[in-house]
Image (cartoon, rainbow, N blue to C red):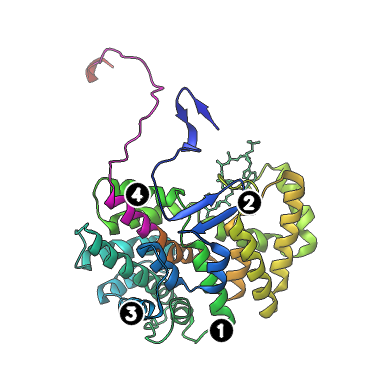
Amino acid sequence: MAEQGGLIKGLEGVVAAATALCDLDGAGGRLAYRGYDIADLARQATYEEVAYLLWRGELPTRAQLDGFGAELVAARPLPDALLSAFRLLPKKADPMRALQMAAAVLGTFDPDATDNSQEANLRKALRLTSQLATAVCSHHRIRLDKEPVPPSKDLGHAANFLFMLTGERPSAVNVRAFDASLILYAEHEMNASTFTTRVIASTLSDMHSAVVGGIGAIKGPLHGGAGEAVMLTLKEIGKVENVDAFVEKAFAEKRRLMGFGHRVYRAGDPRAAILRGLAEDACRQSGQQMWFEMAVKLFERVNRAKGLIPNVDFYSAPLWYSIGIPVDLFTPVIVAGRIAGWTAHLLEQYQDNRLIRPRGQYTGPGRRQFVPLEKR
Ligand code: ACO
């Protein structure tokens, strides 16, 4: 741990909040949401069930899920003003900036915007989860000079996302893979963006403001932005035969390899292991095995030489690419998954709040005499 005189650089190992959401065993490489292993959730649950679990503490019954699903569906449409705002943005606008704007604009329309009660926050968490998915797809369509596809009333969350993106009903196989990937991104303890959202909430600012901050934090390449960077790396490599030469050059240049390494996992990121299987199937089904093969060879070379483990963003890149998600939407898709976890953390933060206000270790000059402007 990088600790100097009480300063813990990057807050490594610091426990910043109690949480009942995510049990992350970094040494054992295991992860559970509210006690349920993520492998079971990814294989057998839907994103809706996981969101319910995170917000309410238990998996829903069939009747509860039906009611909850209907509420999510009802919350999908966006205010016309947000669609108009997307039309005003430059066509080349970064989709993450558009999403940040969307979260802020949605706050201005939300009837519970400034109400920080548990019931209001549950309603806002649900609305944000549905609306941000619609926002990602609507902004994407508008920047391509296409009309947004209105959300479907009869598709689940994952299927509706793919439908709104393309205008076509997605295959069951793609829906299952995408749903599983959203589940795997839904929550991850005190990562940088979740911490950001909790810091904002700790001032008793509102949920939409916290989410705007979370979106800003997750877009960086050391965090959620890594997925996009992985795909750009695979494209740069181009073909499986080029992996060895690429890795040698990357090592010589001391280049940081995106999608590798993790602050907490030592034995391996369990999400990556599940995503690897999903990516293999999806790449094979779409006839794009090359991306999966390239990723595996890159992993083997890097892991053998440096012992670095692939993280969640490594295999989600070939998976999402092969099911037709544009590369610059990878991070917005991560937000569409992580919103359930952010908002679940915010519910926890508001229920047991104390201002998060750490200290800084001063390294500047000692006290000195002020010199008036005309004498400097
Ligand atoms: N490529 C090359 N070397 C690496 C990598 C990498 N991806 N990750 C870690 N290392 C090396 C560092 O160079 C450092 O070596 P040194 O001790 O010889 O200087 C050592 O491993 C420790 O690295 P730190 O950066 O100190 O580890 P930290 O815990 O601060 O960072 C992080 C973790 C940011 C994830 C890092 O591994 C990284 O930059 N990975 C690439 C970006 C990435 O994939 N981010 C996604 C993370 S998962 C998520 O947020 C969704």
Q: Which residue is mark 4?
A: 198
Q: Which residue is mark 1?
A: 172
Q: Return the x and y of residue 28 as percentages of the image width and height.
A: 62, 49
Q: Residue at x 35, y 34 (%)?
A: 358
Q: Residues within 10 Å of mark 1 (few under 14, many from 20)?
A: few
User: Which disc number belongs to residue 67?
Assistant: 3
Q: Secondary structure at mark 3?
A: helix
> Which region is colored magenta?
342-371
Q: Return the x and y of residue 333 as percentages of the image width and height.
A: 47, 66
Q: Residue at x 41, y 59 (%)?
A: 341
Q: Return the x and y of residue 293 as percentages of the image width and height.
A: 74, 66
The answer to whether one can see residue 326 in this image is: no
Q: Secondary structure at mark 2?
A: loop
User: Which disc number belongs to residue 338?
Assistant: none
Main SS, magenta residues: loop
Q: Is residue 367 magenta?
A: yes
Q: Could you tell me if the residues under marks 2 and 3 are in contact, i.e. CB atoms within 8 Å?
A: no
Q: CA distance from mark 4 to mark 1?
A: 36 Å
Q: CA distance from mark 1 to mark 3?
A: 23 Å
Question: Label 2 sits on what residue type?
Answer: Phe
Q: Residue at x 35, y 80 (%)?
A: 73
Q: Could you tell me if the residues under marks 4 and 1 are in contact, i.e. CB atoms within 8 Å?
A: no
Q: Secondary structure at mark 1?
A: helix
Q: Return the x and y of residue 106 as percentages of the image width and height.
A: 27, 66
